Image (spheres, helix red, strand yellow):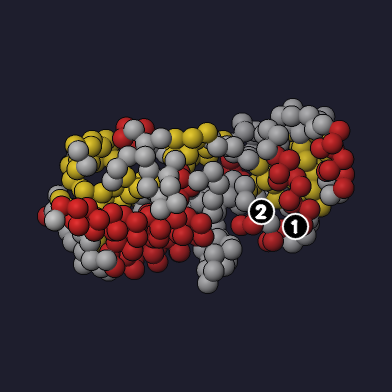
Amino acid sequence: MHTFQKQTDFEVVVVGGSYAGLSAALQLARARRNVLVIDAGRRRNRFALHSHGFLTQDGSEAAAIATQGRTQLRAYPNVAWANDIVASVTNDGGFFEVTLGDGGTVSARRLVLATGVTDTLPPIEGLAERWGRRVFHCPYCHGYELDDADIGVLATSELSMHHALLLPDWGRVTLFLNNAFTPTDAQSAALARRGVAIEATPVARLDGEADVVLADGRRLPMTGLFVVPRTTLTGELAQQLGCAVEAGPTGEFVVTDSMKATTVHGVFCCGDMARAAGNVALAVADGAMAGIATHRSLIAELDLAM
C-alpha cells in the first residue's frame, strides 16, 4: 500500500470506504490502477450489529465485513488510503482536484462517489437509540431474525404501506399510523387480507426492547419495529460537481446509467447514494460495476488520444 503523504496524483479517487466504495476500489486495484480511497469512517449500517442476506457473510458482524474488506483492499501496493473527509472538489476539464478536510489536495482523472446517505428518523423518544438493534428499515436484512413474532410498522407516510404488506411473511404485524397518513378503504382491505392490525392512536415513545407506548398509555410489546426514514445525500460533492439528482421515494439520489456513470464526465457513483433503496449486497454489486466502468473509461480515453 502506498503511503498517502508521498503521492498527490492518482488515476482514481474513491470517496467513501464502505461496502460500495471498497468494492469499486478493489476492481480498480486489480486492474493495477493507482487508487486513493478517502473515508470518513461513518458506514450507514454502523448501528447494526449483524448483516444478513449477503452471500457467504449471512449473520456476520457488519463491522467485521467492512474491516475485512479494508484489510484485503489495502494489501494491494497500488492502493492508498486516507482517513479523512473531502471538503471540496473541482473539475478542470476532466481532471479533478480534491481538497481534504486536513487541507491537503490530490488530483485524479476519475472520481467514484460512494459517500452514501444519511437517515433521518421520526422524532419519537427511544427510536434513535434502538436504530439498527430493534428498529430497522429493511425486512430482507432483519425480518427473519424476529422469529415470526410481533412486529410493528411505524408509519412515516403512505410508503409505510409497503412495509406493512410485506412484513406478515415475517411475523404478526401492527401498523401504527401515528398521524402520518390515513389508509383508504382499498388500502385497509389490503391490510386486512394480510392480517395486519391497524393502530390509530399516536405513539408516545419506545420502551424496553421495542415496546410501543401509545399516547393513551397503552403498551404494545413488539419484537422489532420497521420505519421508512427520510434520506439525504451525505455531503455535497455530487451537487458541487453538477451531477444530476432525482427525487426518490425517501429522498434524492444521484442519477447514473447502467454502468454507474453520472451525468458528469469522469464521475461515477455507486451504493445507496445512487439508487432509491439498497442493502449491503446491492452496494457491493454497484461498486463492482462502478469500478469496472471507471477502468474501462480510462482505457477508452487512452484509445481516443492515440
Q: Tell me the residue that label 2 is attached to.
A: 139
Write the residue at 65% across / 50% down.
134
Write the residue at 67% across / 34% down.
156
Q: Is residue 268 above or below residue 287?
A: above
Could you tell me which secondary element the residue under label 2 belongs to? helix
Q: Tell me the residue that label 1 is attached to.
A: 170
Horizontal and vertical percent position of residue 249: 59, 37
Residue 193 shown left or right of residue 117 in the figure: right
Write the residue at 31% across / 55% down.
294
Horizontal and vertical percent position of residue 98: 22, 41
Q: Is residue 211 above or below residue 158?
A: below
**Residue extending furthest top?**
179
10 Å crowding of disc 1: few (<14), some (14-19), many (20+): some
**Residue extending furthest bottom?**
56
Horizontal and vertical percent position of residue 205: 70, 35
C-alpha separation, residue under disc 1 versus residue under disc 2: 8 Å
Check if mark 1's residue and mark 2's residue have beta carbons within 8 Å: yes
Q: Amino acid at mark 1?
A: Trp
